[in-house]
Amino acid sequence: MPRFSIPLPAIALFAVVVSAFAQAPEPVKPSVKGKGADVASLAKRDPKFAAVVERFQADYGVAIQFARIDDPKVAANHDVTPLEEAHAATVLQVLVWVEAELKRYPKEFIKKHGCRNLVLANAYVSKAWKGTGMPYSPAFIAEKKSDSILMTVPAAIAPSTEVLGRGYLHQALFTYLLADVPSPDSPIALERWKTLASDDSPLETESSRRLTKQSNLREGLYKILWDPFEVADLKSLAKTDAKIVKRIEVIQTFLRTLDQQFNPDFWAALATIPESQRVVCLNNLADRKSADLIKGDVEIQRNIREIEKAWGLRVLWAPGSAAPPMPIRVRLEYSYFTDRKLPEFKRFIRMVREELEIYPAEIVKKLNVKDLYILDDFTFRGAGVAGQGFSWLPQVSFAYGIKTFDPSKTTSKDFFRRTIHHEVFHLMDSRFSVKGGPIYGSNWEGLNEKGFRYRVNDSKENQPFYYKDNANRLGFAEPYGMNIATDDRATLYARIMAEDKAFATRLKTDKILREKADKLLGFFQLLQRDLNIRSTSPFYSRLDINSRPP
């Protein structure tokens, strides 16, 4: 995502950061068995943490505990990586949103029917783990025998951690409740539940199959019911699948037997998408004039066809087209272009075609891009977005929001030219950068000045003076690159590909910037070798010429 788009936590991280709940970090080996962070000592030092611990106990009857390596609650089934003192800020951050989810339950429900302990660790790896890669640590594990739910707290929080974790929390709570189902004849009992499963094979879309498959599981359906977006999609499927209707009824009836507060009003409120999370299209969809004019413009349509042919993707441009698939659910406002800004749209499409056509077919084919969104308004969390790469999708896509594009101004054209390449780089970085490669991990981050930490890795709360404090740092094409290493690389790459002469001059005097440019060249040289790309490619000519100081 280009600069001046979205303040941290930046959604661009989704393109490059795997959810901390998807895989645990490399297990930390403490020097003393069983040592680590301690709830009592942390509560003494941090009043905010102490207050959260007290509220969990008072409001929900839940004790916050930190697991140890030899913790009897977990040692039988899991190898534990304890939390360390350095994880304190992350622990507090996680507990705050867990508390927010518990508040959504009927009053006193968790205290009456929930677990008594929430046991936190940096990782819980099953003793049955046989894999060769990084071991998997579930977000939450229900342990009825010890009256506990075990929770993974990653060393660093990605934006996706909370989004995914909220659903897994509800799933684990329901697993805990199901342990008390008394009779195999109960409608919620597993064997009876299995008779209500839907067949997902005839469904046409991957999302429909995924949702149906998930709702075939008791815990999976319960998790869906806490997400109003998923509920809306499931209700749409239920119109042609009576078994889905029945499964929802069984879940809701079961909960009402535990607490009468689970009534129709509760479920209706739960399924209502908050205004703060709604996707809003700003186009007048009853007006077909704009789409017809753009569709009838020979130059625009020729450029669109050439982009689609060269990249094997679909350009979405017409009012009424889909919203960009933003990774987290906070308010998104978007629109496609109308005839009122036809000249700007025409010039931008031409620029996109000119910039994208230099990329080698060997790279384009490997990226396998599905969609390119050309938007006018693109506002997320109240901030305008100039570009976004969706590299976490099963088939990647990217988008440009060009509300401020002014082809009469050189500065505007230069910014959006950089934006075009910035987003393409995010896709290439995600697809081709591998462990041990020139731009991977410490091979890149180790080039920075001693003591520098990217903003996403800096634990200072809110970091109000981050850019000011780092204003004189060497090695960055733009301040936006200080947010995270992937944007560091993308901003540098975009300056090179946009043929920024002033930036090229900086390569003479900024040693770190020079070293980073060389790392990027090394990355693309390996790519050229591995994909057998001809050395006379216009892409490599531009990359080489503009990454060398004049």
Image (cartoon, rainbow, N blue to C red):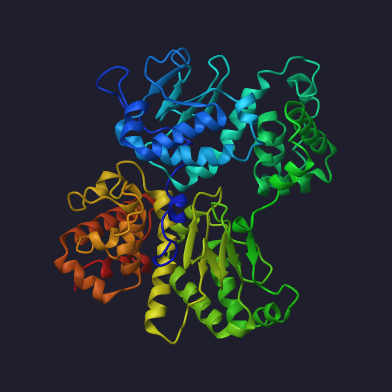
Q: Position of residue 281 (x, y in %)?
A: 65, 67
- Quadrant where the N terminus sits is bottom left
Q: Is residue 174 visible?
A: yes
Q: Residue at x 47, y 65 (%)?
A: 387
Name the residue furthest bottom.
408
Q: Position of residue 295 (x, y in %)?
A: 67, 78
Number of numbered discs overlaid on the protein picture = 0
The residue at 60%/56% (across/down) is 277
Depth check: 267 or 15 in front?
267
Looking at the image, residue 11 lies above or below residue 93: below
Residue 182 placement (x, y as % from top left): 73, 15
Q: Quadrant of the C terminus?
A: bottom left
107 relative position to 361: left or right: right
- Which is nearer the eye, 460 or 40? 40
Which quadrant of the figure has residue 249? top right
Residue at horizontal 69%, vertical 45%? 270
Q: Name above or below for residue 52 compared with residue 389.
A: above
Q: Which residue is rendered at x = 39% and y = 74% of the image?
A: 415
- Nearer to me, 377 or 317: 377
Q: x, y percentage for residue 495?
A: 32, 68
Residue 204 visible somewhere in the drawing: no
> Is 522 in front, or is 333?
333
